[in-house]
Amino acid sequence: MEPQLSWYLALSAILFTIGAAGVILKRNVIAMFMCIELMLNAVNLTFIAFSSFFQDVTGQLFVFIVMTVAAAEAAVGLGIIITIFRNRESLDVDDASILKL
Amino acid sequence: MENNLLSLIIFAPLAGAAINWFIGRRLRNERFIGLIACGAVAVSTVVAFYLALKVGGALRSTEPVFDHLWTWIQVGKFRADFALAMDRLSGTYALFVTSVGFLIHVFAVGYMHKDEGFYRFFAFLNLFMFAMLTLVLADNFLLMFVGWEGVGLCSYLLIGYYTDKKEAGDAAKKAFITNRVGDWGFVMGIMLTFFLTGSISFFNKPAHGVTSALQTIAGMSAVDPFTWQAIFAGGVTSIAILLFIGAAGKSAQIPLYVWLPDAMAGPTPVSALIHAATMVTAGVFMIVRCSAIYTHAPTAMFVVAIIGAATALFAATIGIAQNDIKKVLAYSTISQLGYMFLACGLGAFVAAIFHVITHAFFKALLFLGSGSVIHGMHHEQDLRRMGGLKKYMPITFATMLTGWLAISGIPIFAGFFSKDEILWRTWSAGLFSLPSPAWSKALWFIGALTALLTAVYMTRMMVMTFWGTERFREKHLDHADSVQGIHDDAHHDDHAVHEPHESPWLMTVPLILLAILSTIGGFIGVPYALGSLVGLHPTNYIEQTLDPVVAKVPLAKAEGEPAAEPVWLSHPPQPTDGAPAFVSLDESPATHSAEDVGAERLLALVSVGIAALGILLGRIIFQRRPLLVMPRILENKYYVDEIYDAAVINPINAGSREGLWKIFDVGVIDGFLHAIGDVVTEGGRVIRHLQGGFVRAYAAIILLGALAVIGFFAYFGVHAMRLVP
């Protein structure tokens, strides 16, 4: 049987959910980041799937943009993590809980 | 006619008050302050006499002297001007208020010598004259009420003048608050007058577009029925009763008289001026001014007469048992005021004003004389510690003698003519405001009994003060507190005996002048019946002057006749046709029926007899036993103050403290404010957790929010908010 669109979308949804759960539940900052990347890639998969099935190239264009943004964001985010790690010697996100009034 | 000098009468004392308050305080020079104060009142006196007695003046024609200062309030139909009017009634009043006031001011300069607050005293005294003259000369109810309140304020300031004595402050508050109760009635009366007549002015002033409320009421030919329901009917009787409540407060009638005896805590010139001669007669003035209202309200007149008679007798019975010289005079004042209201209640308005004038003379004299005695006795006020003063204070003694004879009603002194006039009018009162003829005889009897008691207690006072043994020398007399005596302890700590001395000329000269007035003052109102006894036909000046300006009681129906339209004896008051004043009322024998004249003469004889009997009784009883103790209930003034405390004051106090303060103010209002604060605090405590700094929580919330938005669009479709066309 040929892969249906819905299979791709389901896979994408599952990946996204796993990524979202990971962002909330993981304590290691690097692991949080990897989950964020996972969410972004799940969305990419959705776009490609639609682009392929409707023969519309706009989806692939959008994937380009998403990947660019993901790369930039990863660079900045890792820079922040390294700075915080230098100050705290810990990669536990619960230790960075001073973002409050 | 308009005459701008009229405003000088009220503004001179005001200026005096201002000068004394601001400049006198710096200078602290008694001569300066005294001159300014007495000078201001002297200016008022001179201007008043001029405007009243000049050709075409207020007392010599029927046209009042007006002075429209400015239009104060004009809203719709309601019009109140700051405008003065001197007609015959207010002119008469202005004359004796200013002259007696002047004499009292002069006396006070001597009495208050070396007092710390000299400037303050005279500033207040002048302010009082300003307020009183405004009251008298006002041409509408509202301005009269301004003066009314002003005299109440000055009374408060002056009673409480001795700021170091707690009882003075308490008495001042009591006076003001009791007056306030009366003022409620007065204001309601003014409002009802406006409601019924559309105006609150006394006079017609077509040039200023003002109509007279009194004329409107006077023009009503129908009279309110003589029933109790008329009081609550909202008509003329209601106005009359409400105004009388105001008068009862200001003029110390039952039930609002309780402040006047306590007011004796103020300096004696204050007692003389305010609580004898002028302020307390303001109530009588107001009723006579509104005579047009009262002659349309027989029920109200009946109430006035009954309360007047009751107060007269009640106060006389208390006065006989007092041991403080000023308290005796205070209750005497209340009693004499009762006479005036009795006269008003029976339609004898002119007689009431006559008694006001003579009472001002002899009561001021008696109060100032007692002030002289107190001053000479180094501030001793208790009668039981006086005695035999006639050889130490001869001038005071001689002048008080005339005052005593005048108030007791001995002819030819002033009090005899006015009191006798009232008693005659009571005896011969018609049936307009009385249910039956027996009432007029009963009221006459009460009046006669009061006259007897008056003579007795005044004689008691004179005997205890001026005759007999010199009790102030007796050291064994315990330093016991007299029941109501207020005396300056500083002078008695060492029990040394101070020789009593006569007072300086500043104090004795006014006494002499007032004594002269008390002697000859009655001759302005000699009735025909008595004058013709000696073959003279003197003009009854007071009756001729005031007759045109007071309303007459209509001829009432005889008992049993069906209610008919009343027959008015004369036109409504205040005709302004400019007719000359002293058109002699026909004094020929033809206008006075023989039996009336005979009855009047007989009654006059009875009055003299009563006065003589009272004096005799007083001398016999008290010459021998001056320290005779009177019945406790009288000495304790029937415990009225205690009853008021228990029945009215303490419940209000308790209600305010427990209910209004603790439950409402602290509980509800403060509680409400506290609750608002508490809500905010608690809410904050809960919402605080939104920003705990817990990063993963932030992440979770972001996710949940995103889910909510996606879910919304998933459920309702992408066109749900018309964002995508």
Image (cartoon, grey):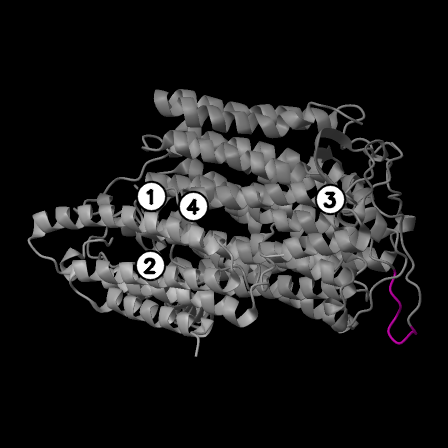
Tags 4 and 1 on a common chain: yes
Q: CA distance from mark 4 to mark 2?
A: 93 Å
Residue bearing the label numbered 4:
B159
Quarter-of-image position of residue A44: bottom left
Q: Quadrant of the C terminus of chain B?
A: bottom right
Q: Which residue is mark 3?
A: B526
Looking at the rendered structure, the secondary structure element under dot 1 is loop
Is B68 situated above or below B218?
Answer: above
Secondary structure type for disc 2: helix
- Which residue was labeled with disc 2? A40
Identity of the residue drawn at 80% across and 55% down: B196
Residue B162 at x, y = what percent?
35, 43
Observer-side mark, 3 or 2, equals 2
Stretch of the chain drawn in magenta = B555-562
Q: Chain of mark 1?
A: B
Viewer can see residue B680: yes
| Separation of residues labelled 3 and 4 (CA atoms) | 37 Å
Instruction: Identify which amino acid the numbered label 4 is placed on.
Output: Ile
Q: Nearer the viewer, mark 4 or mark 2?
A: 2
Left or right relative to B53: residue A16? left
